[in-house]
Amino acid sequence: MAFEWVSYFTCGNCGLERPSPKIPYDRLGYAVCPGCGVETRPVSATAATDASTLADG
């Protein structure tokens, strides 16, 4: 019996879940949700961190 691993894409915006091979990708290789059109891109360090989350070290 063969088993095939399937990776799934889940949109953080609308919650759509589909197998990754069924998801379109932009020219840079980031997934584009077919339900709402939101592109999945990494969050930059400056956008993800603000003064309230910095720790003294």
Image (cartoon, rainbow, N blue to C red):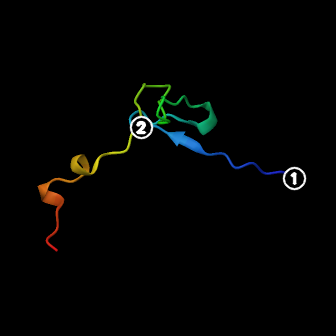
The one nearer the camera, 47 or 15, is: 47
Badge 1 density bin: few <14, some 14–19, many ≥20, Cα 10 Å: few
Residue at 59% in and 38% down? 20
Residue at 29% in and 47% down? 44
Q: Quadrant of residue 57?
A: bottom left
Residue at 12% in and 56% down? 51
Which dot, 2 or 1, sits closer to the camera?
2
Give how far across and how far down residue 30 sits, in percent.
47, 36
Badge 2 density bin: few <14, some 14–19, many ≥20, Cα 10 Å: some
- Tally the marks: 2
Secondary structure beneath label 1: loop
**In the picture shown, does residue 29 fall above or below 42?**
above
Q: Residue furthest right?
A: 1
Give how far across and how far down residue 8 sits, in percent.
58, 43
Give the CA distance from mark 2 to mark 1. 35 Å
Contact between marks 2 and 1 (CB within 8 A): the answer is no
Q: Quadrant of residue 53?
A: bottom left
Q: Is residue 40 left or right of residue 3?
A: left
The one nearer the camera, 41 or 19, is: 41
Q: Residue furthest front?
A: 28
Q: Which residue is mark 2?
A: 40
Looking at the image, is mark 2 or mark 1 earlier in the sequence?
1
Q: Is residue 1 left or right of residue 8?
A: right
**Callout 2 amino acid:** Thr
Residue at 16% in and 53% down? 50
Secondary structure beneath label 2: loop
**In the picture shown, does residue 56 fall above or below 15?**
below
Give how far across and how far down residue 4 sits, in percent.
75, 48
Q: Which residue is mark 1?
A: 1
**In the picture shown, does residue 41 fall above or below 45?**
above
**Callout 1 amino acid:** Met
Give how far across and how far down residue 23 sits, in percent.
56, 31
